[in-house]
Image (cartoon, rainbow, N blue to C red):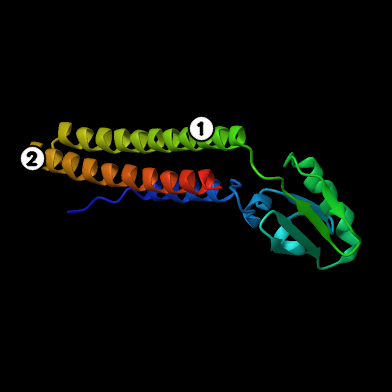
C-alpha cells in the first residue's frame, strides 16, 4: 500500500521553480519569470510579449513582438529590482549581468538552504495533518492499530524520500552556483 502526498509533490515543483529563477554563473531566462509588463491594457509576462535569447553567458536579449512596448518592458525590468540596468537599443532590450562575487554566491547558498528548510517544514506539516486524520479514524473505530502503524511507516518512507529529493535538488543547485 502506497500513500501519495499530492501537496508534497507541489512543494517539490515549487522548490524547482524557485531555484530555476535563481541566477547562477550562467544567465537563465527564468530570472524574468516574475516580471510583468503593462501592455495592451493588462499585465503580461515578459515571455508573452517578447522573445528572450541568451547571446552570451552573461547577457539576455529581449526582443518584443511589438516595438512600441519596448519602453514598458524596460520600465518593468527597472521596477522589478533585478539589480540590472536594461539597455534599450530601440530594437530590443539587453540585460548585462555582472559575474557573481564570492560573497553573492555564499548569500545565494544561504537562500537555497532557507528554501530547503521551508520545503521540509511544509512536508512535515502535511505529514502531521495526515497522521492526525488517521488517528481520528482509529479513535472512531474505523481503523485498526495495525493499519495505523502500517500507514505511519509508509508515510514516513515517503516523507524520507521526498526530503532526499529536496536535498538532491538543492545540492545540485549549490554545486552549479559555486562553479566558476
Give the mark nearer the N terminus: 1 vs 2. Answer: 1
> Mark 1 or 2, which is nearer the eye?
1
Q: Which residue is mark 2?
A: 146
Looking at the rendered image, the quarter that the N terminus falls into is bottom left
Asked whether residue 42 appears in the rendered view, the answer is: no
Where residue 89 sits: x, y (%)?
90, 59
Where residue 175 sits: x, y (%)?
46, 46
Where residue 149 sits: x, y (%)?
12, 38
As drawn, 47 above or below 116: below
Q: Nearer the viewer, residue 117 or 102?
A: 102
Q: Nearer the viewer, residue 143 or 116?
A: 116
Per the rendering, the mark at residue 57 is none
Q: Residue at x 16, y 35 (%)?
A: 138
Q: Is residue 110 left or right of residue 169?
A: right
Q: Is residue 37 left or right of residue 14?
A: right
Tell me the SS state at disc 2: helix
Mark 1 closeness class: few <14, some 14–19, many ≥20 residues within 10 Å: few
Asked whether residue 168 appears in the rendered view, the answer is: yes
User: Hey, which quadrant is residue 136 in on the image?
Assistant: top left
Query: Label 1 to label 2, Cα distance in Å?
Result: 42 Å
Where residue 180 sits: x, y (%)?
56, 47
Q: Residue at x 19, y 45 (%)?
A: 154
Q: Residue at x 76, y 60 (%)?
A: 61
Q: Which residue is mark 1?
A: 110
Mark 2 closeness class: few <14, some 14–19, many ≥20 residues within 10 Å: few
User: Hey, which quadrant is residue 147 in on the image?
Assistant: top left
As drawn, 85 above or below 51: above
Amino acid at each position: 500500500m502506497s500513500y501519495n502526498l499530492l501537496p508534497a509533490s507541489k512543494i517539490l515543483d515549487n522548490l524547482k521553480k524557485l531555484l530555476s529563477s535563481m541566477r547562477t554563473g550562467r544567465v537563465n531566462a527564468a530570472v524574468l519569470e516574475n516580471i510583468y509588463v503593462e501592455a495592451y491594457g493588462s499585465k503580461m509576462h515578459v515571455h508573452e510579449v517578447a522573445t528572450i535569447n541568451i547571446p552570451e553567458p552573461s547577457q539576455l536579449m529581449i526582443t518584443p513582438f511589438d516595438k512600441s512596448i519596448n519602453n514598458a518592458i524596460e520600465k518593468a525590468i527597472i521596477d522589478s529590482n533585478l539589480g540590472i540596468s536594461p539597455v534599450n537599443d530601440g530594437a530590443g532590450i539587453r540585460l548585462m549581468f555582472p559575474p557573481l562575487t564570492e560573497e553573492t554566491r555564499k548569500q545565494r547558498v544561504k537562500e537555497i538552504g532557507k528554501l530547503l528548510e521551508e520545503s521540509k517544514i511544509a512536508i512535515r506539516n502535511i505529514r502531521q495533518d495526515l497522521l492526525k486524520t488517521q488517528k481520528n479514524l482509529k479513535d472512531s473505530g474505523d481503523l485498526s492499530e495495525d493499519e495505523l502503524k502500517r500507514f505511519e511507516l509508509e508515510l514516513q518512507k515517503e516523507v524520507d524520500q521526498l526530503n532526499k529529493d529536496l536535498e538532491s535538488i538543492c545540492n545540485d543547485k549549490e554545486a552549479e552556483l559555486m562553479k566558476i
